[in-house]
Image (tube, helix red, strand yellow):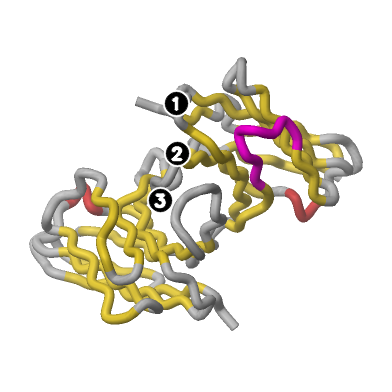
Amino acid sequence: DQQVKQNSPSLSVQEGRISILNCDYTNSMFDYFLWYKKYPAEGPTFLISISSIKDKNEDGRFTVFLNKSAKHLSLHIVPSQPGDSAVYFCAASAGGADGLTFGKGTHLIIQP
Amino acid sequence: DTAVSQTPKYLVTQMGNDKSIKCEQNLGHDTMYWYKQDSKKFLKIMFSYNNKELIINETVPNRFSPKSPDKAHLNLHINSLELGDSAVYFCASSQGRGHGQPQHFGDGTRLSIL
């Protein structure tokens, strides 16, 4: 039972363009959503989060959009840089629960 | 300085053995976690500890037991290892419980069962 879904296993984007990574969820109890970036042989690194009471959060080149009625969020990276090539995980937390529920990840490849 | 460190990075052992993975965080966080990333690449929560109290156990077999000697450490002991235990295990920590607190992860321990 996948409560957080990332339906694109991989995405290829040209350097300088916008990268858009998508995430869908099914659990209405999720109140926070987080994006993590992961390089091979390293642990996930926190990028940006958004509360369910907001529809947008921005941090530098990274912006997360939340559409609560569609149970959909997206991460925009602009402009995309070669160092952005990594696996991106969407994660969610529900209320006071501590564990994060992760999607399967999207492998972003930035082409020169 | 490494914020969340796990040892060993690689662990190869035979079925039936007992092994431990250590985790330490120097961030002063009060909550620590263990996640398992299986062959399908899903990261799934196994345990979390807050102030030395277990607060989540996501139907993990009782062969797995977390032990926290203090707030900065959460070790994972695994008894009678099985083939299905082969995975990457990640330790993480955060300040506070839930409510979107970002979790900081270690680099993982790749466990291979022969």
B11 in relation to A67, above or below = below
Residue depicted at x 21% and y 67%? B13
Return the chain for callout 3. Answer: A
Q: Quadrant of the C terminus of chain B?
A: bottom left
The residue wearing badge 1 is A27
Task: State if disc 1 and disc 2 touch (CB < 8 Å).
Answer: yes
Q: Residues within 10 Å of mark 1 (few under 14, many from 20)?
A: some
Question: What amino acid is at disc 3?
Answer: Asp
Outermost residue on the top side: it is: A70
Taking depth in this image into account, of A17 and B60 the one nearest to the observer is: B60
x, y percent for residue A32: 56, 40
Check disc 3 and report the residue beneath it. Answer: A98
Q: CA distance from mark 1 to mark 3?
A: 15 Å
Q: Is residue B112 above or below residue A15?
A: below
Q: Residue at horizontal 20%, vertical 68%?
A: B77
Q: Quadrant of residue B22?
A: bottom left
Question: Do dots 1 and 3 share one subunit?
Answer: yes
Q: Secondary structure at mark 2?
A: strand
Region rendered in magenta: A49-56
